[in-house]
Amino acid sequence: MPSTLFQLGHEPLLSQAEIEAVLRARHIAYSIIEVTPKYLIILTKQPVDFAAIMQQLGGTVKISERYE
């Protein structure tokens, strides 16, 4: 499963908290792989509709899947 990269907004801690709250509300299990002031990278075990999640997020600039 690819990791997912969230480009955080101007308030990265608030953006991260918002992302985690939305994932928990949707009962999506995730692991945080890396956090920087600009990005949050997570790994999920199930497929996720990130387009729908993006509609709920106000503090996230972009979401992209990261393939290695």
Image (cartoon, grey):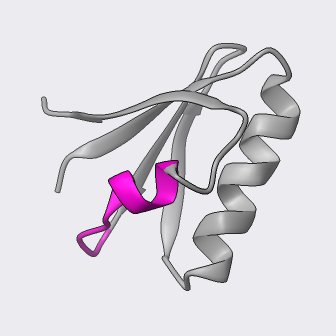
Residue located 52% across and 52% down the image: 55
User: Which one is nearer the viewer's eye here, 13 or 58?
Assistant: 58
Residue located 59% across and 68% down the image: 23
Residue located 64% across and 47% down the image: 57
Across and down, in percent, residue 40 comes to 57, 32
User: Which one is nearer the viewer's eye here, 20 or 49?
Assistant: 49
Residue at the farthest front position: 55
* Residue range (magenta): 45-54
Across and down, in percent, residue 33 comes to 49, 41
19 horizontally vs 33: left or right: right
Across and down, in percent, residue 29 comes to 49, 76
Residue 51 colored magenta?
yes
Above or below, 9 against 2 in this view is above
Above or below, 14 against 30 in this view is above
- State the quadrant of the N terminus: bottom left
User: For residue 56, what is the image quadrant?
Assistant: bottom right
Residue at the farthest bottom position: 27
Residue 52 colored magenta?
yes
- State the quadrant of the C terminus: top left
User: Which one is nearer the viewer's eye here, 42 or 11?
Assistant: 11
Across and down, in percent, residue 5 comes to 41, 33
23 horizontally vs 65: left or right: right
User: For residue 44, what is the image quadrant?
Assistant: bottom left
Above or below, 14 against 2 in this view is above
51 horizontally vs 65: left or right: right
Residue located 73% across and 41% down the image: 16
